[in-house]
Image (spheres, rainbow, N blue to C red):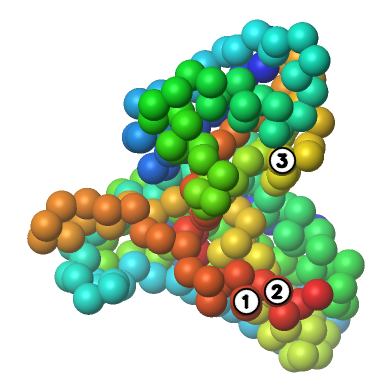
Amino acid sequence: MARVRVQQEDFDVGRELDALARGNNDVGGLASFVGLVRDANDGSNVSGMTLEHYPGMTERALEDICAQADARWKLLGLVVIHRFGSLVPGDRIVLVGVASAHRADAFEACEFIMDFLKTRAPFWKREDTATGSRWVEAKASDDEAAGRWK
Amino acid sequence: MVTLLYFASLRETLGLSTEKVELPMGTSSVSMLVAVLHARGGKWTQALAEGRPWRVAVNQQMADASTPVKAGDEVAFFPPVTGG
């Protein structure tokens, strides 16, 4: 049921969300999260970033996370799109879209998928700053966020 | 043979993105494979040191030190992930 895509190109949020509900009038709500590149992180200006990933495992990890969400909540549609390559501030990085009959399932599944994506999907960010480029460090708060779904 | 992959900062530190390695007799888990890599010394010992926050996947599934490794497997080492 889940559509998972890992791609360099941008995506159209409206079109992706429309596609989740189109032709299915059981869908009562859509929840979504769109992650964007910020222009500052850890006290430095960020002029751009490069996202590296593990082709093959990335798709499998995202599909596995979607399957877990699907088993846990009553969902009618799922889309996860994550970009890689060079991005600049304001660019979209990730979309999670969830369709369900009632809002609680969509809201919770959307948050769950993002929390697990942050800690399980093999992507790594390298930021460009005025003093050079640096790998972004993983945050303990992301592990804590994923841990609360046990 | 196993295929080893290295990503992100670990790839840069080791100066290598992939290699094929013959598993020595009796090497049957991630921790034993790491011991083989440690034996190379220098940056290998440091980059994959205990207590360093590296992660490992076997055949594209998240794994840990106790995960079995056999000939033909794909084993990837990388830092904690930072996507999203």
Q: Tell me if A50 is positioned left or right of A118 in this view.
A: left
Q: Position of residue B13 (x, y in %)?
A: 36, 35
Amino acid of disc 1? Glu
Q: Nearer the viewer, residue A39 or B48?
A: B48
Q: Viewer-nearest of labels 3 and 1?
A: 3
Numbered disc 2: secondary structure? helix
Element at label 1: helix
Please state, as top left, top right, bottom left or bottom right, where the C terminus of chain A lies in the image. Answer: bottom right
Are labels 1 and 2 assigned to the same chain? yes
Q: Quadrant of residue A60?
A: top right
For disc 1, the marked residue is: A144
The quadrant in which residue A57 appears is top right
Residue A103: x and y, percent?
75, 90
Q: Which residue matches tag 2?
A: A147
Disc 2: host chain: A
CA gap between label 1 and label 2 equals 5 Å
Label 2 environment density (alpha carbons within 10 Å; few <14, some 14–19, many ≥20): few
